Image (cartoon, grey):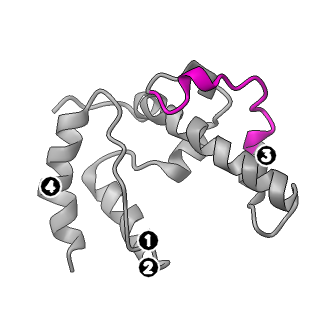
Amino acid sequence: MRMLTLAHARDQCRWFGGMVGDHVADLVSRYGEHSSMVPDELTEYVKSRQGYDYSHHGRTGNPSADFVPDEIVDRFCLLGPAEAHIEKLRALRDLGVDQFAVYDMHEAREATIDAHGQHVIPVLRD
């Protein structure tokens, strides 16, 4: 498996932060900028979202996702080795999350699915 840098992995997944930004913007418009319902980190990142081009929405390499900072990519995506995925998924499970979806839209699709099947899912079955 080709080892990717963290920066490259973030760039591959930045589109997801752009897509989530759509939902965050809806929440901010509904509950307000400084609401306890929407964390300030999310409110701040969608402020830079002007001019978002929906023709790229939900697509890998979305050029309209340049407003998404690394911290948001890290917050919403599983990056790094299987151990990092397991750690984040366990933390989410401990918060009560019981379903996870894999958006495998990057250049390491097969390797990611293989790694989850071999290393992540078996550990999280407990």
- Which type of secondary structure does the marked residue at label 3 adopt? helix
Q: Is mark 2 on a helix, strand or loop?
A: helix
Q: Which residue was labeled with disc 2?
A: 94
The residue nearer to you, when weighing 11 against 99, is 99
Q: How far apart are marks 2 and 3 (CA)?
A: 27 Å
Which numbered disc covers residue 91?
1
Element type at mark 4: helix
Q: Quadrant of the N terminus?
A: top left
Badge 4 crowding class, 10 Å Cα cut-off, few under 14, some 14 to 19, many 20 or more, is few
Q: How far apart are marks 2 and 1 (CA)?
A: 5 Å
Q: Earlier in the sequence, mark 4 or mark 3?
A: 3
The image quarter in which residue 107 lies: top left
Task: State the SS at label 1.
Answer: helix
- Give the spatial CA distance, label 3 vs label 1: 24 Å
Residue drawn where x is 74% and y is 32% of the image: 49
Question: Looking at the rendering, which quadrant does residue 36 occupy?
Answer: bottom right
Q: Horizontal placement of 93 versus 117: left or right?
A: right
Separation of residues labelled 4 and 2 (CA atoms) = 21 Å
Q: Residue 44 carries which label?
A: 3
Q: Using the numbered discs, state the Cα–Cα distance from disc 4 to disc 3 in whole angstroms.
A: 36 Å
Decide which of tag 4 and tag 2 comes sooner along the chain: 2
Q: What stretch is highlighted in magenta?
A: 45-59
Discs 4, 3 touching: Cβ within 8 Å: no
Q: Determine whether 61 is above or below 74 in the image.
A: above
Residue that appears at 55% across and 52% down: 75
- Residue ID at (41%, 62%): 88
Give me the disc on residue 117. Answer: 4
Ranked by sequence position, the earlier of labels 3 and 1 is 3
Count the numbered circles shown. 4
Three-letter amino acid code at the position of disc 2: Asp
Q: Which amino acid does label 3 sit on?
A: Glu
Q: Nearer the viewer, residue 14 or 98?
A: 98
